[in-house]
């Protein structure tokens, strides 16, 4: 890194003090990325396919979905067009929860449906039409989670 010298006006190497702190993702970028991921998965599109349609690698799509990289306005417009949602879909819920700090993580439900397994489980569960079967599945999941709690895991 170079910084101008006040006296000479020339550039010189600046001394650094330790490692740079890791860049933290902006909570709104994380929200937008989560919504991209949820919508992409709901329509059954892979990261590779979305990347191809945007002219990006799947790794870049991953970074967008994690909120590590910010999605620019033009690119977000293209993502919305490809995923067939209005641009404001990605901002639903932003600013709705009073008192939440920027450092708070996504609510557990959003985190759950943002995961591959959570989304698959939710979609499969919604396909079960029989109320009794849905209740039995719910009871099974509850009993399994209680067993996990008792084991301490």
Image: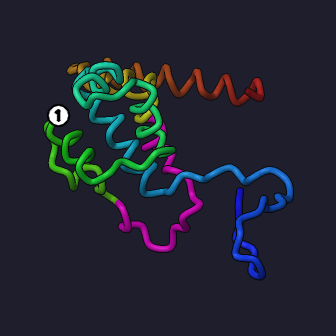
Local secondary structure at mark 1: helix
Residue under the point 54% across and 52% down: 25
The N terminus lies in which quarter of the figure? bottom right
Q: Residue at x 39, y 43 (%)?
A: 33
Question: Residue 124: where, in percent of width, then height?
Answer: 31, 19
State the count of labels. 1
At which x and y percent is residue 98?
44, 73
* Residue 87 vs residue 98, the one in the foreground: 87
Q: Residues within 10 Å of mark 1 (few under 14, many from 20)?
A: few
Q: Is residue 6 visible?
A: yes
Q: Name the colour scheme.
A: rainbow
Magenta span covers which residues? 94-112
Q: Is residue 87 left or right of residue 23?
A: left
Residue sitting nearer the eye, 76 or 100? 76
Of the pair 34 and 15, the residue shown nearer to us: 15
x, y percent for residue 104: 57, 58
Q: Taking 96 as reference, is 19 left or right?
A: right
Quadrant hosting residue 102:
bottom right
In the rendered view, tell whether residue 67 sits above or below residue 84. Answer: below
In the image, is residue 91 above or below residue 43? below
Chief secondary structure of the magenta span?
loop
Left or right of residue 59: residue 86: left
| Residue under the point 55% across and 68% down | 101
Residue 43, x across and y down, in percent: 22, 26
Left or right relative to 96: residue 6: right
Residue holding disc 1: 82
Whether residue 131 is visible, yes or no, is no
């Amino acid at each position: 890194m170079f910084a101008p010298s006040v006296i000479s006006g020339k550039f010189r190497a600046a001394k650094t003090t330790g490692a740079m702190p890791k860049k933290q993702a902006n909570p709104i970028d994380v929200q937008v990325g989560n919504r991209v991921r949820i919508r992409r998965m709901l329509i059954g599109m892979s990261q590779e396919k979305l990347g191809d349609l945007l002219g990006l690698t799947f790794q870049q799509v991953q970074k967008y979905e994690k909120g590590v990289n910010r999605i620019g306005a033009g690119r977000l417009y293209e993502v919305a067009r490809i995923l067939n949602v209005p641009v404001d879909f990605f901002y639903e819920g932003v600013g709705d929860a009073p008192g939440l700090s920027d450092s708070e993580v996504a609510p557990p439900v959003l985190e759950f449906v943002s995961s591959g397994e959570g989304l698959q489980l939710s979609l499969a569960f919604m396909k079960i039409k029989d109320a009794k079967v849905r209740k039995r599945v719910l009871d099974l999941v509850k009993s399994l989670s209680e067993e996990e709690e008792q084991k301490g895991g």
